[in-house]
Image: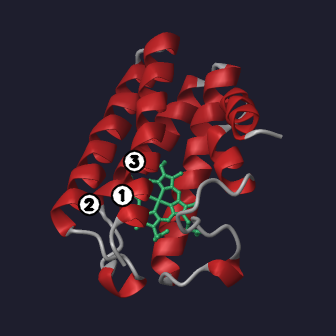
Amino acid sequence: MSKTGTAILCGAASLLACAAGSGWGQVSQIPTTVEQQDESPQTRTTMHSKLLQSQRVMEGLVRRDFEAIEEAASILKRISLSPPPKLSSAGDKSDEQVYEHFRLEFARLAGQLERQARRREPEATAWVQQNLTATCIACHDYIRDFPQ
Ligand code: HEC
C-alpha cells in the first residue's frame, strides 16, 4: 500500500496503534517490545501507563463514559507532574527546557481534558483529547529528531 493510503487508514483507525504498527518514517522508532527498549524501567512504566490511560480516554469518548475520561485524565495529569527523574540516563538527550515545555503543555491539556469531561461536553472533550494526542507525538518527534 502507498504511504498516503497507509496514512489515510491510520487517520481512520487509532493513530497511536498505527504509528506503532506501520513502521513510520526513517527516524528511530518508539520501541514497542521489551527487547527494543533501552530506557529505564521507570520511563517504560510511565509511558506504558500514558498509553493505557489515553486508550481509556478514547474508549470513554466512543462510549460516552465521561467518568472514565475524567479519571484517566487525572491520572495523566499526575503522571506528567512527576516525570521520570533520570531521563538523561534513560537515553533522552533532549534539551531540558524544550522537554519541559512539552511536559507542561501535556499537563495543562490533561487538566483541561479532566474539566471538559466533568462538564460532560462531548465535542470539547474530543477536541482536547486530540490536542493531547498531538502533544504525545510532538514530544516524541522532538526526542527522535534531537541530534544523537
Ligand atoms: C514530554 C515528553 C513526552 C510526552 C508529552 C509523551 N512522551 Fe512518551 N516518551 C517520552 C520519552 C522521553 C520516552 C522514552 C524515550 C524514547 O522513546 O526515546 C517515551 C516513550 C514512550 C513509549 C515507549 C515506552 C515503552 O514502554 O515502550 C510510549 C508507548 C509512549 N512514550 C507513549 C506516550 C503517549 C501515549 C503519550 C501521550 C499520552 C506520550 N508518550 C507523551 C516522552 C514523552
Task: Point out residue 4 in the picture as x, y percentages from the top left corner.
Answer: 69, 33
Front: mark 2 or 1 = 1
Do the CB atoms of the residues marked 1 and 3 lie less than 8 Å apart? yes
Up/down of 80 relative to 108, above or below: below
Within the image, what quadrant is residue 106 found in? top left
Residue 117 drawn at (x, y percent): 46, 23
**Kind of residue at badge 3:** Ala
Say left or right for 32 vs 97. Answer: right
Q: Position of residue 84 (x, y in %)?
A: 36, 73
Task: Give the residue displayed 55% in from the left and 29% down from the top.
Answer: 67
- Horizontal and vertical percent position of residue 38: 54, 84
Q: CA distance from mark 2 to mark 1?
A: 8 Å
Q: Which residue is mark 3?
A: 138
Left or right, 120 with respect to 30, comes to left
Q: Is residue 71 above or below residue 122?
A: below
Q: Which residue is mark 2?
A: 99
Q: Residue at x 28, y 57 (%)?
A: 81
Q: Residues within 10 Å of mark 2 (few under 14, many from 20)?
A: some
Is the CB atom of the residue marked by disc 2 within 8 angstroms of ligand 1's nearest atom? yes
- Specify the quadrant that holds the N terminus: top right
For the residue carrying disc 1, how many other residues have a C-alpha within 10 Å: few (<14), some (14-19), or many (20+)?
Answer: some
Secondary element type, mark 2: helix
- Residue farthest to the right? 1
Q: Residue at x 64, y 19 (%)?
A: 64
Mark 1 CB lies closer than 8 A to ligand 1: yes
From the image, tell me which residue sits under label 1.
142
